């Protein structure tokens, strides 16, 4: 099987959510430095909700994608949960996952939850 064949590579989509909106943030600019800190630099902000992307991935059979909450604000949590419900079993979720809330994401349809050392 060649390097560029579909069996050698798999496309893994991602839905990055910041403050409830699907965005692409420039790496390293999303920081919590307190008052007066410059906000993150955004490469792209989608007009569509997270469910739009989850529906597209489901329709195209793109399993194993990630929903990443870039700051687990209430708006981001709701957008992440909505995306998981739109593609049950098809998406993983990470960012702000704790031992107290992991079950909620699994029940909403996450195939996996991605945790950090916070849980341990």
Image: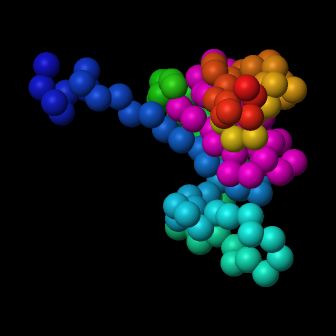
Q: Nearer the viewer, residue 114 or 117?
A: 117
- Locate residue 56 relative to residue 38 in the image: left or right: left
In the rendered image, which quarter contains the N terminus?
Answer: top left
Quadrant in the picture for the C terminus: top right
Residue 54 in the image, given as x and y percentages of width and height: 62, 36
Write down the quadrant of residue 106 in the picture. Answer: top right
Q: Position of residue 31 (x, y in %)?
A: 68, 64
Seen at 61% across and 48% down, the residue is 16
Q: Position of residue 68 (x, y in %)?
A: 64, 42
Residue extending furthest toward the left: 2
Can residue 51 be seen at all in this image of the molecule?
Answer: no
- Image point 59% across, 44% down: which residue? 15
Residue 56 vertical position relative to residue 87 in the rendered view, above or below? below
Q: Is residue 116 left or right of residue 75?
A: left
Count the labels in the image.
0
At horizontal 51% and vertical 25% (from top left) the residue drawn is 64
6 in relation to 73, above or below: above
**Residue 81 sits in which quadrant?**
top right
The segment highlighted magenta reads 65-92
Residue 68, above or below 30: above
Q: Residue furthest bottom?
A: 36
Q: Depth check: 16 or 49 in front?
A: 16
Q: Nearer the viewer, residue 109 or 60?
A: 109
Residue 9 % position (x, y): 29, 29
| Between 31 and 5, the one nearer to me in the picture | 31
36 magenta-colored: no
In the rendered view, tell whether residue 19 sits above or below residue 74. below
State whether residue 33 appears in this view. Answer: yes
Q: How is the image coloured?
A: rainbow
């Amino acid at each position: 099987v060649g390097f560029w064949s579909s069996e050698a590579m798999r496309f893994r989509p991602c839905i990055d959510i910041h403050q409830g909106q699907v965005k692409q943030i420039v790496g390293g600019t999303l920081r919590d430095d307190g008052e007066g800190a410059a906000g993150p630099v955004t490469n792209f902000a989608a007009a569509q909700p997270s469910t739009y992307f989850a529906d597209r991935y489901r329709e195209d059979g793109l399993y194993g994608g990630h929903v990443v909450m870039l700051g687990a604000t209430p708006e981001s949590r709701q957008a992440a949960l909505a995306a998981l419900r739109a593609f049950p079993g098809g998406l993983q979720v990470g960012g702000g996952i704790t031992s107290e809330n992991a079950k909620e994401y699994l029940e909403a349809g996450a195939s996996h939850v991605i945790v950090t050392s916070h849980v341990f």
